[in-house]
Amino acid sequence: MTSKLELLEQQLAGKEAKIAIAVALAASVFYAVMPILIRISEDYVSPNATIFNRSWIMTAILGLWNVLWLRSRQTNHSVKDSLEKLLVPLLGLVIGFLGTQLLWAWSLSQTNVANSEVLHSVTPGFTTLAGWLLFARKFGGRFLIGVIAATVGAIAIGASDLSNSISLQGDGLALLSAVFYAAYLMSIEKLRAWWTATIVLMWASGACTALSFPVVIIAGDEVLPHSVRGWLALITLALDTVVCFSLVGYSLKWLSSELMATILLLSPILTAVLGWLLFSETLSLLNLLGFAVILAGIYLAISDKGGIKALEN
């Protein structure tokens, strides 16, 4: 009887892991178009106002969702009882989310999309290093090779653009945004043991709204767009972010932040393909080589199974 129960649990864990990986892959699709949408939104409002408006629109959407859909459901623990225990990851969530959004938006206003995305793509390296230094996590050789390969592949895709950088400051901001994004992913991973993905994201977007508004005022930027196109751009960006980060949050209940960050490196491939399909941009041999290396790296990281929490036992 015990052996049958253990076999059933293993089968369920394997199913959950496969679903989480599929959801993470889907998240990379929405993640791929995010920098493009940010860049479009910045044609109508400043980077600071872009983040503020996206955040409050996200908070409104998530608040309505949680009230209408999750009202009758219970999370693992009450918010009141868990706040004290989760203060540190909550701070990491808020600081990581706000820092990522502001730094990424600032970088996109100073450098091109390819530069910003490539430098932002080194997040797996930061999550892996932080996991080893802060939490003494151990990684298999296949996983580490996969992370390194996928990161190198992402850099290779934008190597030609990096050689023609239009702003070292913008590139530096994009790289720094990767550090904050690593903190954001690791904080979600901790909080997902307590709350649903949408509640975690609502906390992040709500705090980002409150903290980004003073930035807009101090900078003297226009708070709201003055055209229908501007509003459409911001609403589309907010919806894309809600879907993307909700899928990320869902997956992080079963996948480690290190593996999640690596899977999201599919986004440079998708962005480059979209550029080829929609804007007739050229795909070089180096781009294609980068695609192959990223896919191989992600496969190695997933097949190691060290980043899949459902299969750890």
Image: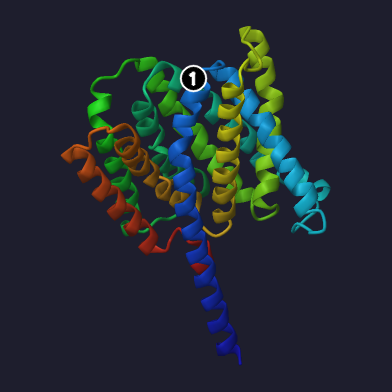
> Hey, which quadrant is residue 129 in on the image?
top left
Q: What residue is at 27 percent from the left and 32 percent from the top?
A: 281
- Residue lying at 56% horizontally and 89% vertically, measured from the top left: 4
Q: Is residue 84 visible?
A: no
Q: Position of residue 5 (x, y in %)?
A: 60, 85
Q: Which quadrant holds the N terminus?
A: bottom right
Crowding at label 1, few (<14), some or many (≥20) Cα neighbours within 10 Å? many
Pick whichever, 96 or 135, lies toward us. Answer: 96
Q: Amino acid at mark 1?
A: Trp
Residue 290 visible in rendering? yes
The reply, left or right, for residue 162 in relation to residue 82 is left
The relative height of residue 70 versus residue 245 in the rendered view (above or below) is below
Q: Quadrant of residue 47?
A: top right
Q: Is residue 281 left or right of residue 238?
A: left
In the image, residue 255 above or below residue 50: below
Q: Residue drawn at (68%, 23%), measured in percent from left and top?
A: 211
* Circle 1 residue: 106
Nearer to us in this view, 17 or 191: 17
Expressed as whole percent of the image width and height from the top left, the position of residue 79 reads 79, 48
- Give the residue at x 72% y 25%: 210
Compared across the picture, whether 248 is left or right of 158 comes to right
